[in-house]
């Protein structure tokens, strides 16, 4: 006799729990529509990096390590071929000034051949290109590639990483005296 009312009560309790659960379940919050952000026009920034690259070559021709170094961030890293990495603006000024002076003394000049690419993503940019080394007669004695990474700081684009390499194979190692 108590079974039917008890069964009915149990069913009613289950229905109530389900109803409350369904009623209390939160609907997922409507996701805001993602705003479409227009791509930033980077043409002026890329032009600035290219102008700095050309200025770098002009300063190198004058063996002006101070001016070249001022194109680099305080914590920049220069990675020249055949030499240890150079860290920091002051050391880069010295290295580049001395390297440019040796190049001039040898009757050679370094020329920017072309800018092969550049790009910007946020506050980081890069530029790549080719260079030639010519002797006093104008003959090309070397050519190669460069890649520079820049960071935007207060509207300027100082170099933060800079490296280059020759297209020519390295010179063979000199053999020690008495060896073949």
Image: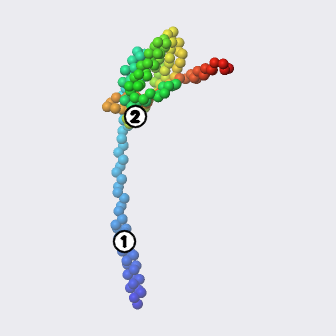
Residue closest to the eye, 48 or 134: 134
Q: Residues within 10 Å of mark 2 (few under 14, many from 20)?
A: some
The image position of residue 149, as x and y in percent, is 43, 31
The relative height of residue 36 versus residue 57 in the rendered view (above or below) is: below
Residue 98 location in percent, x, y? 44, 18
Residue 58 in the image, given as x and y percentages of width and height: 41, 17
Vertical position of residue 26 compared to residue 159: above or below:
below
Residue at far left of view: 154
- For the residues carrying marks 1 and 2, which lies nearer the camera in this image? 2
Distance Cα–Cα, label 1 vs label 2 = 56 Å
| Residue at the image position 35 percent from the left and 49 percent from the top | 33
Residue, far front: 178
> What residue sits right under mark 2 in the picture?
124
Badge 1 local density, few (<14 within 10 Å), some, or many (20+)? few
Residue 19: give its label.
Answer: 1
User: Taking the image as drawn, is residue 99 in sight?
Assistant: yes
Q: Is residue 109 visible?
A: no
Give SS at disc 2: strand
**Image quarter for residue 25?**
bottom left
Residue 127's image quarter?
Answer: top left
Residue at the spot 45% in from the left edge and 19% down from the top edge = 99
Q: Secondary structure at mark 1?
A: helix
**Residue placed furthest toward the top:** 137
- Where in the figure is residue 89, as x and y percent of width and height? 38, 27
Q: Quadrant of residue 42?
A: top left
Q: What quarter of the picture does the N terminus occupy?
A: bottom left
Using the image as rendered, state which of residue 88 and residue 167 is in the foreground.
88
**Total marks placed:** 2
């Amino acid at each position: 006799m108590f079974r039917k009312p008890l069964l009915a009560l149990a069913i009613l309790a289950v229905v109530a729990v389900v109803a409350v659960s369904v009623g209390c379940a939160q609907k997922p919050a409507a996701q805001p529509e993602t705003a479409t952000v227009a791509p930033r026009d980077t043409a002026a920034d890329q032009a600035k990096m290219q102008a700095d690259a050309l200025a770098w070559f002009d300063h190198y021709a004058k063996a002006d390590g101070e001016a070249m170094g001022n194109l680099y961030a305080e914590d920049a890293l220069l990675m020249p071929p055949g030499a240890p990495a150079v860290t920091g603006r002051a050391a880069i000024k010295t290295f580049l000034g001395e390297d440019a002076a040796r190049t001039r003394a040898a009757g050679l000049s370094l020329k920017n051949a072309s800018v092969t690419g550049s790009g910007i993503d946020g506050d980081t940019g890069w530029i790549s290109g080719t260079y030639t080394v010519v002797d006093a007669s104008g003959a090309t004695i070397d050519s190669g590639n460069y890649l520079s990474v820049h960071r935007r700081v207060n509207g300027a684009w100082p170099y933060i990483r800079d490296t280059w390499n020759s297209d020519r194979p390295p010179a063979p190692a000199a053999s020690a005296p008495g060896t073949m």
